[in-house]
Amino acid sequence: MSDSLAAAGTAAGPMAEVVLTGDLTRPGRLTVSELLTWPQHRARVSFDCATSGIQHHRFTGPFLHDVLVAAGPGFDPARRKDRLRFLIAVRGADGHRALLSWAEIDPDFGRAPVLLAVTIDDTPLDRAGPQLVLPQDRCGARYISGIEAIRVDGGYTVWT
Ligand SMILES: Nc1nc2c(c(=O)[nH]1)N[C@H]1C(S)=C(S)[C@@H](COP(=O)(O)O)O[C@H]1N2
Ligand SMILES: [Mo]
């Protein structure tokens, strides 16, 4: 990380980190500024909240799929069928959590353009932590903010 980015993180509190764990050959921690090193995408979204109604936001960030592929999910990338049992568990700092299937975001299957957003409405999420953005969702409940952990799971315990 450059000195200027490190300074930006410490000027008004520490920069948030996301822990990547599970069935990965390269697990680790990523800061929001490190998420800027992937190709960035934009999404203008609307979603409905059961308590506060329709919300409109603009987000930018990398595709969740790109970030997780770089972490080395534990399947053979040449064998498409192997991916189908993988789950992605996303947890916010407040304990709010949701599951996605790997196939949901895989370009060969559901192709959902899910972002790990690093800005919301032009405001950086450096200290709040990234937010999950699912343009395909009608409801806002999976737009998990303040993400602190993402776990990739090969589903080995699902079928016991
Ligand atoms: N960490 C976290 N993220 C969350 C929630 C939550 O409780 N915790 N609530 C979700 C719900 S129900 C909605 S509708 C959206 C939008 O919430 P907002 O209107 O407060 O932005 O955030 C989602 N993300
Ligand atoms: Mo909501």
Image: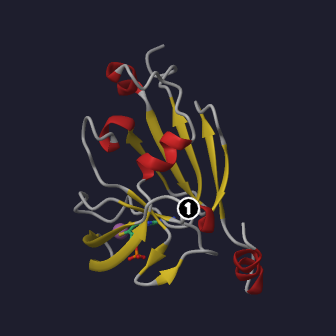
Rendering quarter of residue 158:
top left
Q: Residues within 10 Å of mark 1 (few under 14, many from 20)?
A: many
Q: Nearer the viewer, residue 139 or 52?
A: 139
**Is residue 85 in view?**
yes
Q: Give the amino acid at mark 1.
A: Leu
Q: Position of residue 5 (x, y in %)?
A: 69, 76
Residue to which mark 1 is pinned: 35
Q: In the drawing, does residue 124 fall left or right of residue 121?
A: right
Image height of 3 relative to 105, above or below: below
x 55%, y 61%: residue: 37
Q: In the drawing, does residue 30 fall left or right of residue 154?
A: right
Image quadrant in which the N terminus is located? bottom right
**Is residue 52 in view?**
no
x 57%, y 40%: residue: 71
Image height of 37 relative to 5, above or below: above
Q: Position of residue 99 (x, y in %)?
A: 42, 44
Q: Secondary structure at mark 1?
A: helix
Q: Quadrant of ligand 2?
A: bottom left
Image height of 121 relative to 22, above or below: below
